[in-house]
Amino acid sequence: MAEPIIKLKDLEITYNLGKVNEFKATRGVTMDIYPGEFVAFFGPSGCGKSTIFYSILGILAPSAGQLFVKGENPYSFSPEEMVRFQTSVIGIIYQAFFLIPSLSVIDNVALPQIFQGVPVKKRRAWAKELLKRFDMEEHAEKYPENLSGGQSQRVSVSRSMVNNPNILLADEPTGNLDSVSTKQVMDALETINMVDKKTVIIITHNAAQLSYAHRVFYMKDGKLERIVPNPEKKQIAKIDKQKILVTEMDKLSKLFPYSSPTELKVKSVVNYLTQDLDFDQLSKLENLTQLMIERKISKDEFSKLLSRDLKQGGVGISGGVAETMANKVLKILEQSEDTRRFRRRFERNNFFAREDFLIEKLTGYVEKEYSGEFTLSQKIILKKLVYKRISGLFNKEEFEEKLQKTQENGGLSLDQNMARKLTLHFEKIIAQGSESKGHGH
Ligand code: ADP
């Protein structure tokens, strides 16, 4: 198998070395990236992703450890060799595009070729070719200020490819883009990887983009926490057979990308203890629940699928339990309609005629979860609390606390367990009834 195109060994990068504000941004980072791989660096802000990038780019020297790109140590290069390295071995794309405002699109793309001494006609023709590839040909004579974010990024993708580099580094390339432009840029990177066979490394915050990568490098606190191969992609790096086996941990790590392996193991066991369902069952349950929430299946279909055998596409839950679960979900969904109605009107106008009626209904739903009987004055208090929570004057904790307060203090004197039960039920109704805001991070 090919030698790694990038090799880091115990890489350590310290900012402000020897000063009072000395800061170790990465520690003991060891990784091999192979020619033709698409790799994603993923991790919370400040974990050291960009630091490693700039180090690979030759502009941030390691404080300790080793770094090789195409078998060479860039920090041993003469200034001329460094220029060659940074212009023709590595292409880079930034979140903020960094196009030059005074140059037209085509000249922005051709710019890196000036430093290579390519004659103007030739470099413009080549730039045009690239713009065509990334669907930007018709904008060639425009200036950057007249482009949308997505178009600007496709120009910088074209520019990054102009010297035909081996490696493309993309630092949060879609951080400023809407979802349509994001897909176009990610697809362009995928083409560069799959068709041009370039090694592509991206920094991303967006878990949805991890599916483009052969391998995901999860970083945390300056360390490489783990490397997860993408089971959907044919691997280039040699992967332990054992590692490519998709385990519950891999699935959990997709759901909880920022959790450490220990945290994932804890989740796995806790799932097992609390639900009596294994991960396969849980994820099938989630899929079915989604269909139910989106009203694509009826309660009876939901219940039937829950109790159907696992091998026949069901969840394998016993009939009685399945029926109870289905009823619970249906109840929440039905009750949440009133939350939705209330929130819609409330957000438009602070007062409306049917407000009281909806609060009454919502109060009734909370009351039903109570095992005892409320007095009239308790009902009036509960209604006030429900109103405050649903209109956002109280948060969940305040609502739960108030339920436990005495009547003189505006509460219902409920014990802790009952207060929690009513709060949980009400919170589910609120959550299901709120307009979804999409899944950013
Ligand atoms: P990421 O790309 O994962 O968000 P960075 O690599 O930018 O993280 O930063 C890693 C850590 O190093 C952060 O805590 C950051 O504050 C620190 N850092 C980054 N650049 C500098 C610098 N020039 N001087 C001092 N500390 C820095």
Image (tube, grey):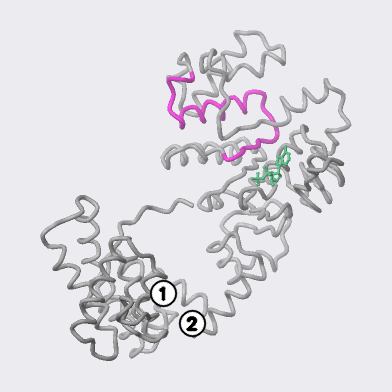
Label 2 secondary element = loop
Q: Name the residue tied to disc 2.
A: 277
Query: For this view, does 376 lie left or right of residue 427?
Result: left
Q: Name the residue tied to disc 1.
A: 285
Q: Position of residue 256 (x, y in %)?
A: 55, 63
Foreground residue among 2 and 417: 417
Q: Is residue 58 above or below residue 115?
A: below
What residue sits 74% from the left and 27% below the top?
Answer: 86
Instruction: State the separation of the CA atoms marked 2 and 1.
Output: 9 Å
What residue sits 78% from the left and 35% below the top?
Answer: 60
Q: Position of residue 387 (x, y in %)?
A: 25, 67
Q: Is residue 308 above or below residue 132?
A: below
Amino acid at circle 1? Leu
Q: Is residue 383 above or below residue 81?
A: below
In the rendered image, the residue lying farthest to the left is 353
In the rendered image, the residue lying farthest to the front is 408
* Residue 309 shows in this picture: yes
Extent of the magenta region: 144-172
Amino acid at circle 2? Leu
* Residue 3 shows in this picture: no
Foreground residue among 92 and 412: 412
The first of marks 2 and 1 along the sequence is 2
Residue 327, picture quadrant: bottom left
Residue 195, picture quadrant: top right
Callouts 2 and 1 close, C-beta under 8 Å: yes
What residue sits 23% from the left and 90% below the top?
Answer: 373
Q: Is residue 151 magenta?
A: yes
Q: Position of residue 161 (x, y in %)?
A: 62, 28
Query: For this view, does 62 lie left or right of residue 197?
Result: right
Q: Is residue 18 above or below residue 119?
A: below
Q: Is residue 125 magenta?
A: no
